[in-house]
Amino acid sequence: MSTGAAARGRASLLLAPLAAAALLAGCTAGPAPSPAGGGAVPSTSAAPAGSVSVSTLASGLEAPWSLALVDGTALMSERDSGRILELDGDGGQREVGTIDGVRARGEGGLLGIAVHDDHLYAYSTGADENRLQRFELTGGPGSFALGRVETLLDGIEAAGVHNGGRIAFGPDGMLYVTVGDAGNAQAAQDPGSLSGTILRLTPEGEIPLDNPFEGSPVYSYGHRNPQGLAWDEDGTLYATEFGQDTWDELNVIEPGGNYGWPEVEGAAGDDRFVDPVQQWAPADASPSGMAAADGSLWIANLRGERLREVPLEDLSTSVEHLVGEHGRLRDVAVGEDGALWVLTNNTDGRGDPGPQDDRVLRLELG
């Protein structure tokens, strides 16, 4: 995919013929297992004492959003400043670079980052769009820097809310991107739109030939505001999603699947849509970043102020950690030693920041 206007041209190829094919595919996709009790609140328990050991790796961060672990250190995005920081694990911070053109407003700004083959990938909000870029990543721990930039995809609808923004590389080597509905709910049911989708691209920003819809980066649609991506050892893709006021969701993502928003929120038992495998009241959740480790999915929750563990052997259950202990949690990543790195998010304008916020926490699993 080329940059600038050519990238926008690629997005504009998603027209009516594609929409018709996508709707047919969405109707025939087999639904994932519904939550226990046909959409009831899942079986949840509190974590036993001592199940995790918590320490602080970094503090004094401003509106952090995403972590990318590389070569034993962490790169982090700051939503409002547009900065990429390097965290050395001993509390040290240094600026790697600033993403030009970031226009922070509401939930928009510099959002997800990922590292792949000596490139840093970043999803950010500009003046009137969201865009996906990659930068040459030079140097190493203690000297990382950003080099030449390429715009892989732009013209993605942006707003003060529901920008999605999580990016991650799957076990297939492809780049997955969550895109919110940008406050335009009906666009999520239009497969000719990029809004309300999960996208799948090559590392160069091209459309893979085996995507479910020919000539389209859309991998699944009918999403409101997905913000977490993780894969299990079998290569199954999971995504978290913010609901409106009824249900937040954990979904198993199927190629070409229609996840229902805004026609349904949570499990509906409607063959046209793929039901979530687990759902929660938004007051207990607002699920953002997610990682797979130690046989479970680990989900950072904002409004719910907890780290939720979902055992992969039973997706209808969950265990809650750190409830109310560290405020809003935005992202979680797995370190090289298997420990979890968790990003708090109390300085994003919706939290109640403490004197050391925001922080990166390190959790050793018991």
Image: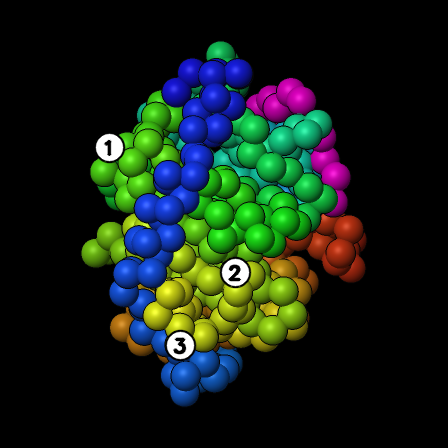
The crowding category of the residue bearing disc 1, from other C-alpha atoms within 10 Å (few below 14, some 14 to 19, many at least 20), is: few
Q: Which residue is mark 2?
A: 261
User: What is the spatial separation of the Cα atoms under label 1 and label 2, in whole angstroms?
Assistant: 27 Å
| Labels 1 and 3: the sequence-earlier one | 1
What span is in magenta?
95-106
Label disc, if present, on residue 130 of the rendered structure:
none
Q: Which residue is mark 3?
A: 269
Q: Decide: marks 2, 3 in contact (CB < 8 A)?
A: no
Q: Which residue is mark 1?
A: 209
Q: Element at badge 2? A: loop
Residue 70 x/y as whole percent? 41, 35
The crowding category of the residue bearing disc 2, from other C-alpha atoms within 10 Å (few below 14, some 14 to 19, many at least 20), is: many
Residue shown at 53% from the left, 65% from the top:
263
Query: Quick check: 141 above or below 27?
Result: above
The crowding category of the residue bearing disc 3, from other C-alpha atoms within 10 Å (few below 14, some 14 to 19, many at least 20), is: some
Query: Quick check: 346 above or below 295?
Result: above
